Image (tube, rainbow, N blue to C red):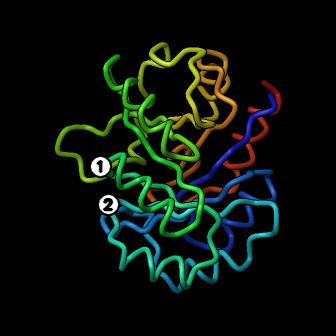
């Protein structure tokens, strides 16, 4: 399968190397203190500087303020901002204009009406991340290892390129891509040995399964 892959929640040089060497087109760094995958500015800068040209460096933030984004974009050489909170359409457009970086907006899906939000966000974001909606009162907006009913978005398209996320693993990614028609996938917990701990062997197995599919 010719599917582009983003591996998110990278925290160590070994994890970044494993993702890059396995062929991931995007690497993601999480800036959200409640997440076990959170990294600070200094760590993220060091990791990002080691990412080779041609691999996109994505910063995941949750309802970040302009001040937080000023510091992040000023100190970490990233290529894209991933807005994974409750950012409005206006906020997505504002961030895109203010910081001059492509913006990916995450939208949680669990029922048909959630898909309507993708139509709207597709008009203001550069990319969409179609993720499983987090559980009620959950601490994390993503990275929960949950999937959703892929039939809800089967063969759908929006005004922006999109990426499928939510509970993807070596065992289900081929089926997920076949059912949805996704050209890009994002995963985090599916290649971990423990929350926040990436497993190079699982990364390699995931990429191999996708290529073989």
**Would you say the residues marked 2 and 1 are in contact, meaning their CB atoms lie under 8 Å apart?**
yes
How far apart, in angstroms, are the residues tagged by discs 2 and 1? 6 Å
Location of residue 208 by image quarter:
top right
In the rendering, at what x and y percent does residue 138 appear? 23, 46
Percent x, y of residue 153: 50, 19
Q: Which mark is residue 196?
A: none
In-image side of 182 versus 75 (left or right): right
Q: How many marks?
A: 2
* Closer to the camera in the image, 52 or 74: 74
Crowd tier of the residue under label 2, counting other residues whose Cα lies within 10 Å: few below 14, some 14–19, many 20 or above: some
Q: What percent of the width, then of the height, locates residue 86?
A: 29, 49
Q: Residue visible at 44% across and 53% down?
A: 93
Position of the C terminus, as image quadrant, is top right
Q: Say which quarter of the image contains residue 15.
A: bottom right
The structure residue drawn at horizontal position 64% and vertical position 27%, both measured from the top left corner, is 182
Measuring from the top left, give residue 91's x and y in whole percent.
36, 55
Taking 41 as reference, is 134 above or below it?
above
Note whether 132 is above or below 104 in the view shown: above
In the image, residue 203 sits, relative to residue 97, either above or below, namely: above
Residue lying at 50% horizontally and 59% vertically, measured from the top left = 96
Picture residue at 31% right of the left edge, 39% below the top = 134
Provide the residue designation for mark 1: 86
Side of 105 relative to 58 (left or right): left
For disc 2, the marked residue is 63
| Sequence-wise first label, 2 or 1 | 2
> Please, is residue 8 above or below residue 210 in the view?
below
């Amino acid at each position: 399968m010719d599917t582009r892959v983003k591996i998110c929640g990278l925290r160590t040089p070994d994890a970044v190397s494993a993702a890059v060497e396995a062929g991931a087109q995007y690497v993601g760094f999480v800036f959200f203190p409640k997440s076990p995958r959170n990294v600070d500015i200094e760590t993220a800068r060091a990791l990002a500087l080691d990412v080779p040209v041609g691999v996109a460096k994505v910063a995941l933030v949750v309802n970040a303020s302009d001040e937080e984004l000023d510091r992040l974009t000023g100190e970490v050489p990233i290529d894209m901002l991933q807005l994974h909170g409750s950012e409005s359409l206006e906020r997505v457009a504002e961030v895109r204009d203010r910081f001059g970086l492509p913006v990916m907006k995450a939208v949680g899906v669990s029922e048909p009406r959630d898909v309507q939000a993708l139509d709207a966000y597709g008009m203001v974001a550069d990319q969409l991340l179609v993720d499983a909606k987090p559980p009620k009162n959950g601490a994390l907006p993503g990275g929960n290892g949950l999937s959703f009913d892929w039939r809800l978005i089967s063969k759908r398209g929006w005004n922006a390129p999109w990426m499928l996320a939510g509970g993807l693993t070596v065992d289900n990614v081929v089926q997920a891509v076949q059912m949805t028609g996704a050209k890009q996938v994002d995963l985090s917990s599916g290649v971990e040995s423990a929350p926040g701990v990436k497993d190079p062997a699982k990364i390699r197995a995931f990429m191999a399964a996708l290529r073989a599919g």
